[in-house]
Amino acid sequence: MVEEVRVAQLWRYPVKSLKGERLNSAILTLDGVEGDRIVHVAGRRGPLTGRTRHGLLTLPALTDPDGVPTVQGHRWDSPEAAEAVREQAGQDARLVADVTPERFDILNLLVATDGAVEHLGHDVRRLRPNIVLSGLPAEMEARLPGQALAVGEALIGVHSVRQRCIVTTIDPDSGEQDLEVLRRIQDVFGGQIALNSWVISPGEVHVGDAVRIVSSRESPTRVGGWVVGAPYEDESA
């Protein structure tokens, strides 16, 4: 039985693979949460992420009042931010502004449900969602793809359940690895947890907003990013 569904948490990740910032409200654009993943870490041959540079996941990233991402309290384009990233990702690492759709692994929103997170039994931050919904039992995740979530004026399409990777094994505070987290996701959830989603209609959403599950015939115009092999162009590579 589905209880009243609400927005329980909102998250933004100003710098891809760095820590997220928890929000009270978020503006959903056709490009996802405003200000989400607008900077990434690049190396000589392409983007560097928490999949191979686990220490990045422990670096704090926030958005300043002017909408500029910061790393450890410094503007993303400052020498201090660059040094913090190099310490975790290697001397060839650098920060790059990026607003292309490839910066999202699959689609521009990831939605988690409280039932699945509770069943997982680990910190929701390991899943790196943009939105966490309350009032949904764990088994509902598999039923939501193909439907949509109406939150105020915003409409969110649900595409599929996310196949999870090694990032879930990294503690976002200590950086320590616990492979049992991914084993549990594989054993209990078939390797998949949280929902690949996208913004159909923009709008502002707030923690506590009611969510309606509605039928939808919409499909995303593009699915996939670096994770599924989208090309990465870097003139200096």
Image: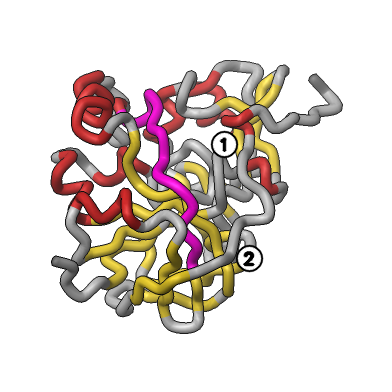
- SS label for mark 2: loop
Q: Does the magenta stretch include residue 166?
A: yes
Residue 21, visible in the rendered structure: no
- Above or below: residue 133 compared with residue 195: below
Above or below, 139 against 23 in this view is above
| Residue extent of the magenta highlight | 156-168
Chain-order first, disc 1 or disc 2: 2
Tell me the number on the disc at residue 24.
none
For the residues bearing labels 1 and 2, Cβ distance under 8 angstroms: no
Q: Is residue 147 above or below residue 42?
A: below
Identify the secondary structure beneath mark 1: helix
Q: Quadrant of the C terminus?
A: top right
Horizontal and vertical percent for residue 82? 60, 32
Residue linked to disc 1: 80
The residue beneath circle 2 is: 30
Amino acid carrying label 1: it is Glu
Residues at marks 1 and 2, CA–CA distance in whole angstroms:
32 Å
